[in-house]
Image (cartoon, helix red, strand yellow):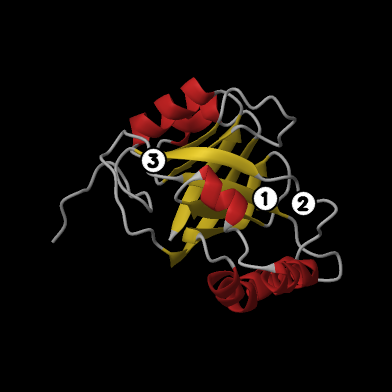
Amino acid sequence: MHELVVTGNDPAAAAEAAARVGGVCYAADPDDRRELPFRTLVRAMTDAPDALAPAATVGTYLAFSRIIRERPLGSDPGTPSPGLTAIFPMIHHPALTHSEGDSHWRDTHAPLALRHHPGMWDYTQLSIVGTLNGPSYDGFALVSFASLDDMAERFFGDEHDREVIRADVAKFADTQRSPRRVVTTETIYRQRPPLPAVTWPHD
């Protein structure tokens, strides 16, 4: 399904916008002072995109979400989800088109990720189908782990896992231009993937 995805740097604005439209908010640790491509990301399905404007100070995108793996634990609406989510912005390899890079990411990389990231308990690919404003990305990988320790120690099982993933990423992504990952906490304000906050009667 298609979603609006916005990125920014104001956690309060992102949380307020996500709550208003029943979206999903991802926010980096406020104590992390490293230079990041953005500090918040909000996902939503809404017919009131202006409600997301305060959270969209870096970029606004139309994306198609692909759920590769879902974690076994849920959370109450409006409360932080268990674990942490690393967001990887992706720019396609210069030798490929967007479509070619996206197809490889979906059909080849996703199965490899399931095999070679032993600690990964949740994985969604947000494939960008349109950049409305901001930096031009081809997608955002949302890769979740149960804890920071799991992210650090079980991102790969061994050196073979690391080499397989690195070699494959280099085939479809521009590893020099794709920005660094953003480690975030997720808060779901209605459900994930997001759906409109209002439904309409129909025959």
Q: Secondary structure at mark 2?
A: loop
Please tell me which of labels 2 and 1 falls first in the chain: 1
Circle 3 is placed at which residue position?
23
Q: Residue at x 51, y 60 (%)?
A: 119
Please tell me which of labels 3 and 1 falls first in the chain: 3
Percent coordinates x, y for residue 192 in the rendering: 36, 51
Q: Residue at x 65, y 48 (%)?
A: 131
Q: Residue at x 70, y 38 (%)?
A: 134
Within 10 Å of the Cα at label 2, are there few (<14), some (14-19), or many (20+) other Cα atoms?
A: some
Circle 1 is placed at which residue position?
89
- Residue in the foreground of this view, choosing between 167 and 2: 167
Mark 2–mark 1 CB contact (< 8 Å): yes
Q: Residue at x 86, y 70 (%)?
A: 95
Q: Confirm whether residue 83 shows in the render.
A: yes
- Residue in the foreground of this view, choosing between 62 and 194: 194
Percent coordinates x, y for residue 15 in the rendering: 43, 28
Separation of marks 3 and 1 at Cα, in angstroms: 20 Å
Circle 2 is placed at which residue position?
178
Q: Amino acid at mark 3?
A: Gly
> Is 155 above or below relative to 46?
below
Task: Nearest to the eye among marks 2 and 3: give it.
Answer: 2
Mark 2–mark 3 CB contact (< 8 Å): no
Q: Secondary structure at mark 3?
A: loop
Within 10 Å of the Cα at label 1, are there few (<14), some (14-19), or many (20+) other Cα atoms?
A: many
